[in-house]
Image: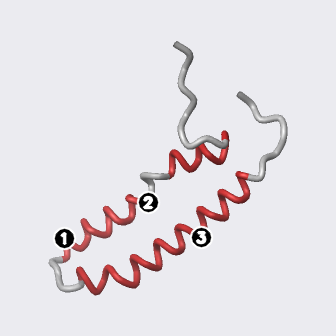
Amino acid sequence: MKRSEPTWRIPVGILLLIVGLIAYGLVVARYVPELVGTWPVLVQTLIYLVLGLIWLLPLKRFLIWMETGRWSAARPPE
């Protein structure tokens, strides 16, 4: 289904995504080093790798909302 008119969700969604990522990054940068700073380097690397990828989990539904206004993809007809 192709969109024929612009929607407010895309610019608002991009702004929310940027604000959310900045907030997430600041929280991680502020609190995680205090928790894992004395751990072995390989464990720290694994923790930061997981935290660097975890923000991707809700991204699919968020992008679907930006395009369609729904939080899940449309079900194919049965």
Q: Position of residue 50 (x, y in %)?
A: 31, 62
Quadrant occupied by the N terminus: top right
Secondary structure of the residue carrying tag 3 is helix
- Using the image as rendered, state which of residue 6 and residue 69 is in the foreground: 69
Name which of mark 1 and mark 3 comes first in the sequence.
3
Q: Amino acid at mark 1?
A: Leu
Q: Which residue is mark 1?
A: 42
Q: Is residue 43 left or right of residue 18?
A: left
Q: Nearer the viewer, mark 1 or mark 3?
A: 3
Q: Residue at x 53, y 25 (%)?
A: 75
- Circles 1 and 3 in contact, beta carbons < 8 Å: no
Name which of mark 2 and mark 3 comes first in the sequence.
3
Secondary structure of the residue carrying tag 1 is helix
- Among the 4 quarters of the image, the one containing residue 70: top right
- Circles 2 and 3 in contact, beta carbons < 8 Å: no
Q: Which residue is mark 2?
A: 55
Residues under labels 2 and 3: Cα distance?
Answer: 13 Å
Q: Residues within 10 Å of mark 3 (few under 14, many from 20)?
A: few
Q: Position of residue 65 (x, y in %)?
A: 61, 45
